[in-house]
Amino acid sequence: MENLIDMVDAGEINEAENRLYDLISATDMNSLEVAILFYSYLNDKTDDFLEANDFSRDEIKLGMENVADNFSLNSIAKMFLTDF
């Protein structure tokens, strides 16, 4: 996870997200935790930071929806993603 955070902080958000998807497994609950922490970290970034690095809040939401779908948690995720 640390490497992903370093990539985000360096502005390599898209690359970090791609790496995240390479690392996670739908059968490993630790992967779910890593993905949630990743998108939560991204969500804490300013709009200016995200925009400067070609990323958006909509992409964060979509990423969380994809992760939730991979873990068959999409109905639960919809409850939380309205505030995301």
Image: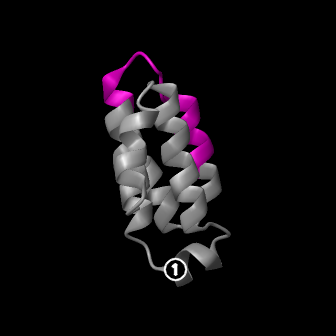
In the rendered view, tell whether residue 11 sits above or below residue 34: below
Q: Outermost residue, top direction?
A: 27
Q: Main secondary structure of the magenta part?
A: helix
Q: How many marks?
A: 1
Residue at numbered disc 1: 47
Q: Nearer the viewer, residue 27 or 82?
A: 82
State the residue at coordinates (56%, 73%).
Answer: 50
* Residue kind at label 1, given as amino acid type: Asp
Q: Quadrant of residue 45?
A: bottom left
Name the image quarter holding residue 55: bottom right
Residue 20 position, x and y percent, is: 52, 39
Quarter of image, res 36: top left
Q: Residue at x 37, y 60 (%)?
A: 41
User: Which residue is drawn at the image coordinates 41% and 15% (left, top)?
Assistant: 27
Q: Quadrant of the C terminus?
A: bottom left
Q: Nearer the viewer, residue 49 or 82?
A: 82
Q: Is residue 42 above or below residue 62?
A: below
Magenta residues, start to end: 16-31
Q: Residue at the far bottom: name it.
A: 48
* Residue 78 in sight from this viewpoint: yes
Does the magenta segment cover residue 45? no
- Single out the residue that lies furthest toward the right: 54
Q: Point out the image quarter for the N terminus.
A: top left
Q: Residues within 10 Å of mark 1 (few under 14, many from 20)?
A: few
Q: How is the image coloured?
A: one colour
Judged from the image, the secondary structure of the residue bearing numbered disc 1 is helix
Q: Residue at x 37, y 69 (%)?
A: 44
Classify 44 as above or below 75: below
The answer to whether any part of residue 12 appears in the image is no
> Measured from the top left, where is residue 26 in percent x and y?
46, 21
Q: Position of residue 23 (x, y in %)?
A: 50, 30
